[in-house]
Image (cartoon, rainbow, N blue to C red):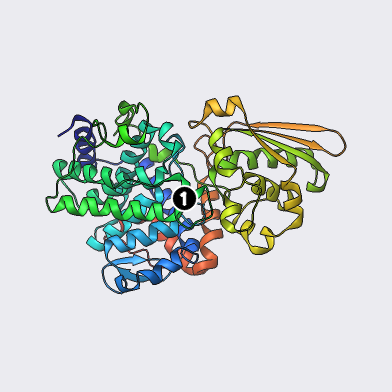
Amino acid sequence: MGALIETIAEYAVHEQTSRLPDEVRHHAKRALIDWFAALLPGARLEPATRLFRALSDELGHGRATVYGINQRAPLRTAALLNGIASHTIEFDDIFRDAVYHPGCPVIAAALAAAQSREVDGDTLLRAIVVGYEVSTRIGVAVQPSHYKYWHTTGTVGTFGAAAAVATILRLNAIQFADAIGTAGTFAAALQQAFRTETQTKPQHAGNAAQAGALAALGAEQGVTGAHDILEGAAGFGAAMSVDPDWSKATDGLGSRYNITAMTFKNHGCCGHSFAPIDAALVLKKEHGFTAAEIERITVGTYKASVDITGRWEVRTPFDGRFSTPYTVASAMVHGSVRLDSVTPERLADPAVHALMQRIEMEIDPRCEADFPGRRSALVSIALKDGSRLEHYQPTRKGDPDMPLSDGELTEKYYELATPVIGKPPADKLLAEIWAADQRNVVSFAT
């Protein structure tokens, strides 16, 4: 067994029976709440709805739940479809240092496995924790170079899903290493998928969930995987990053829990737009101007933000969610960027489109130097009266150094879940999640 995977596997097996700190349990429940908040509305939209039809012959049997249509399915099908739905509206969690959305692949796979094997809530929470801890560290080890071409949620997420399902299956250290070894060769997702208008990006998360689950299920039956898949000469790191630092993959493993440092989104769009939105809203609140009074906005940010969200032609929800000019303009005109920011009416709003054309984006050296450990923005607003306002936003609302409180997270959950399932079912689901570790079997019916 390779030394790196051996260390990871030993940690994971130990976590099956260790005393999980109360704070870690709490944050695992927060992650589960946030995942459902993103999943439920996403299950009503394409591509999830199209794929429900495409995979209709795989539905109606099995023990796992496909949310949105509330049908039973085998483990891998449920993991795939729930993973896709939870990454659709761009409201899912982030581990900032890895440029990674762990909830979609990890929780989709963990919950499908927990329901399929009828395990208790404590085991589910442990699986979520292990999936987050293993995958976030692998993600940090290969960044920032990995993010030049690869979508971390679809690549690193495969390791997270494998680790989570392996924990549900209670694999031993050799089996766990086999699962991670196989997951490494399944891990792929290209950023080009969201540089243009497609419905591929959410499928990255779903594919990571089901591919990781397959790796763990195979390992349970003795299927072997390459134990040096991470650091090997032709392995994941060598092929998909430049000079990965594998010491980061085990740094603090089992003592410092990355799940306690998650970003929960406060805006319904790509996270690269958050700091500019936050900064613009701070200036509007402090100075009380209206959108009509703005002459020009300059957004200083980091290169990845410019590359991914620097678009001025916005016609579809995808365009809107991946456009900093659109989201900043929408925030200035309407006061927020929530789900309604990409309705047909908002997407066609002439006031928003007029302001977009007066927004510039540029790479700010301080913001670029901070990425990916900090997502900052320097926003300057010139008003028509000649005054110039400026605000440096060092982090994003929702990041671990400016976190959403439990109350704010609950408000977000109700905002997104209630229109889909109604208030009483939303109340029931929320109560079940907070009491997950007291449940003998996890169902989370909606």
Could you say which is closer to the camera, residue 192 or residue 405? 192
Say which amino acid is labelled 1: Ala
- Seen at 45% across and 36% down, the residue is 148
Which secondary structure, mark 1? Answer: helix
Q: Residue at x 62, y 28 (%)?
A: 364
Q: Residue furthest left?
A: 222
Residue 434 makes an appearance in the image: no
Quarter of the image where the C terminus is located: bottom left
Tell me where residue 103 appears, x and y as whole percent. 40, 49
What residue sits right under mark 1 in the picture?
193
Q: Is residue 225 left or right of residue 290?
A: left
Give me the residue at 45% from left, 41% from top: 262
**Count of labels in the image:** 1
In this view of the protein, can residue 331 be seen by the observer?
yes
Q: Is residue 104 left or right of residue 280?
A: left
Q: Residue 442: which quarter of the image?
A: bottom left
Front residue (pair 194, 265) = 194
Residue 182, how many percent across, how many down?
22, 45
| Quarter of the image where the N terminus is located | top left
Question: As drawn, is 109 to the left or to the right of 180?
Answer: right
Query: Residue at point 27% right, 48% down?
Result: 162
Residue 298 lies in quadrant: top right
Q: Position of residue 186 (x, y in %)?
A: 28, 48
Q: Tell me the crowding category of disc 1: few under 14, some 14 to 19, or many 20 or more residues within 10 angstroms, Cα based.
A: some
Please state the horizontal and vertical placement of residue 154, each as a whole percent of the image. 38, 47
Residue lying farthest right? 385
| In front of the other: 423 or 346 | 346
